[in-house]
């Protein structure tokens, strides 16, 4: 039969070594990287403006007028994004 004290010490050592301190508080939420968020917004804006420009050209507008209107619509519709304030 195995004595209880060495078994308990081994279990405690294993718990401390594998998971660090049992009482440490680790943040479960990942930190947001502003560069990634900005990149996603810029990609969204470019794709949205390109799609809307194509729709407006299909309606008979020139490419320059359609792009200007698409950018204006994006800024009006998605004013809460950081990319809407950039031109």
Image: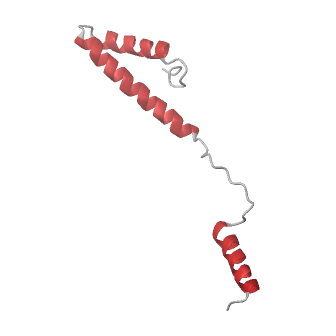
Q: Which residue is found at the position 49% from the left and 18% from the top? A: 78
Above or below, 3 against 62 in this view is below
Q: Where residue 54 sits in the image (x, y, percent)?
A: 28, 18
Point out the image quarter for the N terminus: bottom right
At x 37%, y 21%, the residue is 49
Choose between 79 and 67: the one closer to the eye.
Answer: 79
Quadrant in the rendering for residue 45: top left
How was this image coloured?
secondary structure
Q: x, y (%) of residue 84?
A: 50, 20
Name the side, left or right, on which 27 lies relative to 51.
right
- The residue lying toward the viewer, choosing from 51 and 27, is 27
x and y percentages locating residue 66 in the rendered image: 32, 12
- In the displayed structure image, the side of residue 41 where residue 19 appears, left or right: right
Q: Is residue 7 above or below residue 86?
A: below
Counting every numbered tag in the picture gives 0
For image coordinates 32% across by 17% down, the residue present is 53
Residue 46 relative to residue 11: left or right:
left
| Residue 71 horizontal side relative to residue 25, left or right | left
Hey, which residue is sitting farthest top in the picture?
60
* Vertical side of 64 occupied by 41: above or below: below
Q: Kindly give the residue lying farthest to the bottom in the view shown.
A: 1
In the image, residue 79 sits, relative to residue 28, either above or below, namely above
**Coordinates of residue 33 in the picture (x, y in percent):** 57, 41
Residue at (33% x, 23% y) in the render: 50
């Amino acid at each position: 039969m195995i004595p209880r004290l060495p078994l308990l010490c081994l279990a405690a050592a294993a718990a401390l070594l594998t998971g660090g301190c049992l009482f440490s508080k680790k943040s479960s939420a990942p930190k947001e990287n502003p560069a990634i968020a900005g990149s996603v917004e810029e990609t969204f804006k470019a794709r949205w403006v390109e799609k809307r420009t194509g729709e407006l050209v299909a309606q008979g507008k020139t490419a320059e007028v359609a792009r200007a209107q698409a950018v204006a619509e994006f800024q009006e519709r998605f004013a809460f994004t950081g990319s809407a304030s950039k031109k």
